[in-house]
Amino acid sequence: MIKYLKPSVFILSLFPFLIITYKIFFNKLGPEPVKEITHFTGEWTLIFICLTLSMSPLKTFTKLSLWINIRRMLGLFVFFYATLHLLTYVGLDYRFDWQPIFDDVVKKKYVFIGFAAWLLLIPLAITSSRKMVMLLKNNWKKLHRLIYVIAIFGSLHYIWLSKTIFFKPLIYFIIIILLLAFRIKIKNKNINYG
Amino acid sequence: MKKIKYSEITPENIYKNRRNFIKKFGLAAGSVFLGQNLNSPAKAAPKNEDLKLTEYRYVTTYNNYYEFGTGKSDPAERSEKFKTTPWDVVIDGEVENPLKLSIDEITNMFPSEERIYKLRCVEGWSMVIPWLGFPLNKILKKVSPTSKAKFVKFTSILDPEQMIGQRFPILDWPYKEGLRIDEAMHDLTIMVTGLYGKKLPNQNGSPFRLIVPWKYGFKSSKAIVNIKLVEKMPTSSWMKASPNEYGFYSNVNPRVDHPRWSQATERVIGESIISPRIPTTMFNGYGDQVANLYTGMDLKKYF
């Protein structure tokens, strides 16, 4: 069972990518195709952030450690979809026209924070191999806590780009806050019980 | 003294584009629809590339109409059963003779003509839509505004039973918008009852909506039940929601960015994945007709 877990999760995680590829080639993106790809890849980035953050709570609830086995891979999919999202914006939407892109990053807080989140993902992606985990030891855990910051940035990015917080930006924000709050609770427990 | 045209003070490349656009546009706008034949398709198809009509299916499935939800497809999916009859519109406030008109009375009193307008959304996309309607000034003249009438306030319907979005505090319901009296009296400002030669679909603001083509789309209220002439500048729902983002005027202006989005370019709805953004034009391309309304005004301050 466990043997097939990782490959199955890998294939499942590729599904959104296959769907958007299909939509592009069969012209099923609707009235605003570029925005559709941007939103699609952006939303899947947030979903994978939430999935990645759910693994350690799931471990606690189910008392199964297999969740941790797939956590790094899910984290890499965060980077994968975030990079597709960024490439869509830079390449498809702005045609690598750096001037307006640079203006956006400096002037628009949602672009700034989104870009910052992507930059923060890079060290995590680089250090995601088993070798790196061994090599960095305790520092690996510390470094990878950056995902908490990235999650908040991602959620703020969505809230700030939307005309109103209702409803999806709010829903993702609440989910991420709950997932992060769960971790604070655990910490307190540890303190209480030594 | 020679009167300087607005277009003469804009950069030439933009000016030429727009000039071309408006030339074709004016022709299309002037083609009066004789008798509102609700079943036949629009006859005045534009020949110009710039004015390529947005496909009917996109015009009617890609809508911002938060009364029915914040998703673009929500209005089309959720407004099918929305009741548009009976429908009364009250025109009152600072007027000599206030009126209460049913939607049938309105269509009988004011013959519809076709106007092909470009619609520019504040989110950075645009469509070209053949509306059926008539100038708002025809209604306003009927009620004779008093000298106190400086602004016009538009109020849309409040009906949370039928409009799911109104059950949540997304905006200050009912939707409110406003125009200065001279903007409202301008011949380009129209009240709309149809599009593409047909009755206005519910998701597009049936039965009675406003269209102000040189302003961002949200200024053009849908499902209007009250037109009130007032002395003080009305506060629109969007101004109330976020005063530093949405101003009263909200004229299309590529040089004044929305705090969150650049307004320099726009995407044309219905174009393929490889089509580039196009530059946004001042007053959405209607500068020659409307720029004189804002002479001497700092449009950065009065955004």
Image: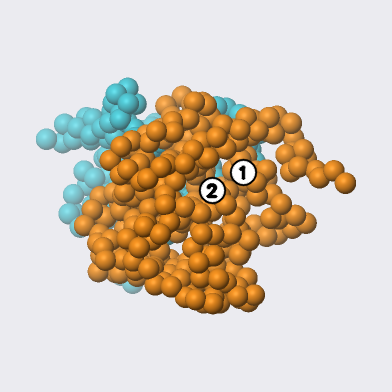
Chain colours: A cyan, B orange
Q: Which of marks 1 and 2 is nearer the N terminus?
A: 2
In the image, what residue occupies the spot 71% across and 55% down?
Answer: B294
Q: Is residue B14 above or below residue B239?
A: above
In the image, what residue occupies the spot 30% across and 37% down?
Answer: B40
In the image, what residue occupies the spot 61% across and 33% down?
Answer: B23
Query: Which residue in the structure is indicated by mark 1?
Result: B286
Which chain is home to disc 2? B
Query: Residue A30, which numbered label?
Result: none
Give the SS element for disc 1.
Answer: loop
Q: Can residue B70 be seen in this view?
A: no
Q: Where is residue A167 in the image (x, y as percent from the top left)?
A: 35, 58
Q: In this view, does B220 lie above or below B149?
A: above
Residue at the far right: name it: B1
Q: Position of residue A169 (x, y in %)?
A: 39, 55
Disc 1 to disc 2, C-alpha distance: 8 Å
Q: Can residue A63 be seen in this view?
A: yes
Q: Where is residue B243 in the image (x, y as percent from the top left)?
A: 58, 65
The C terminus of chain B: image quadrant: bottom right
Q: Is residue B46 above or below residue B60?
A: above
Query: Residue B213, which numbered label?
Result: 2
Say which of A61 and A161 sits in front. A161
Task: Please state which amino acid type lies under the numbered disc 1.
Answer: Tyr
Task: Please state which amino acid type lies under the numbered disc 2.
Answer: Pro
Mark 1 neighbour class, 10 Å CA radius: few under 14, some 14 to 19, many 20 or more? many
Say which of B268 and B119 sits in front. B119
Q: Where is residue A112 in the image (x, y as percent from the top left)?
A: 57, 46
Say which of B14 and A120 sits in front. B14
